[in-house]
Amino acid sequence: MRSITFREMEAFQSMRLNLTTAAAFLLIWLYPLSSWGLKCFMVSPDTGLYGTARWVKVNEKDTLLDIARDLGLGYNQITAANPGIDPWVPPKGSVVLAPMAFVLPQKRIPSGIVVNLAEMRLYYFFSNGGHDYFFTAPIGVGAEGFLTELGTYQIKSKTPNPAWVVPESIRKAEPDLPAEVPPGPDNPLGDYVFRLSRLLYAIHGTNKPWGVGRRVSHGCIRMYPEDVAALYPVVPVQTTVEVIYEPIKFGWGDGRCWVQIFDDFDNRIDNPLSKVREQLADFESAVGPLEVDFKALFWALKEKTGVPTAVARLKSP
């Protein structure tokens, strides 16, 4: 696998958007801490866009879910970026897009965890050695009717190898479940759990990693086992957790305004185009008149691929 160059990305978007100037990714050098590798970035005041993208060749027996997990993506991201490709049986030898680029949420905190339910992604903001960083990872979220309540929480406790005391509401729906599931491979909490301060919610691992990037839980936040294991040693009790819902994110970088749009599965935005135009007006107030690429904007709103797309730049003098 390799990173996409600017020229390749422009050609790819030109093919899919039929535009003369298409979206491209801003490549920011990564600042890995410990084993976090491609999931950790240094925060820059000059950009809201981080990461890059990769073309990945599908090997024998690969699924899109295998590729997604290897690269720190969830099911929703890899499938939205590759419409029409069977996630379980992608054509061997084909090339798929791994959209490893992120616009930071508009609502974020200097230190702590931000959970963006609409994006199905978690961000942990922290400082180290005089610099600000964030770690990001995909998550599984609540199924329909069980979406986590928005708002501010704290981590009240954290536990390795937890037992799962099955809530009464779940036992009513699944009466064959025992009252308690001990630690081990059958435990849906995985190897680590962060319990939140309200409503029995938790951030935890999972014994079913293919649920990451899907609506699968009763309100808890599920992470890949390796991601929750990376966070467990460094996230202390009393850390703030902000749960938000932002299907449309905006960022300014490389002289352009970018949008990253996900499916508004909870139907909370009545007029997406109006929301985007309001944000562009705010950018104009801050940086000056913009030249908007409405073709790219309408495409991003229609397709909802989760791929950051450049939709505006400063007007030439």
Image (spheres, rainbow, N blue to C red):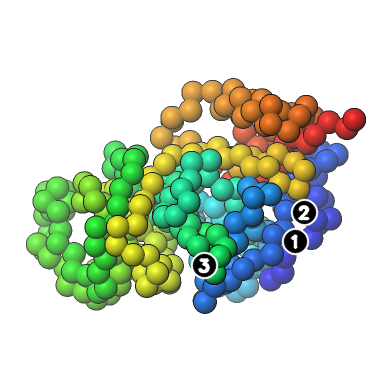
Figure quadrant of residue 146: top left
Mark 2 vs 3, N-terminal side: 2
Residue marked by disc 2? 9
Q: Residue 185: image x %, image y %?
A: 27, 74
**Mark 2–mark 3 distance (CA, rounded to whole Å):** 33 Å
Q: Horizontal placement of 262 versus 237: left or right?
A: right
| Residue marked by disc 1 | 4
Which of the two marks, 1 or 3, is nearer to us in this view?
Answer: 3
The C terminus: image quadrant: top right
Classify residue 235 as left or right of residue 42.
Answer: left
Q: Secondary structure at mark 1?
A: loop
User: From where the camera sits, is residue 239 visible?
Assistant: yes
Question: CB under 8 Å between callouts 1 and 3?
Answer: no
Real-space Cα separation, disc 1 to disc 3, in angstroms: 30 Å
Q: Determine which residue is flagged by label 3.
A: 128
- The residue lying furthest to the front in this view is 130
Where residue 183 is drawn, which disc sits there? none
Residue 189 position within the rendered picture, expressed as x and y whole percent measured from the top left: 27, 65
Residue type highlighted by circle 3? Asn
Q: Amino acid at mark 2?
A: Met
Q: x%, y% of residue 82? A: 62, 52
Q: Quadrant of residue 140?
A: bottom left
- The quadrant in which residue 230 appears is bottom left
Query: Up-down: is 212 above or below 32?
Result: above
Amino acid at pointer 1: Ile
Nearer the observer, 20 or 82: 20
For the residue pair 82 and 313, the one nearer the viewer reads as: 313
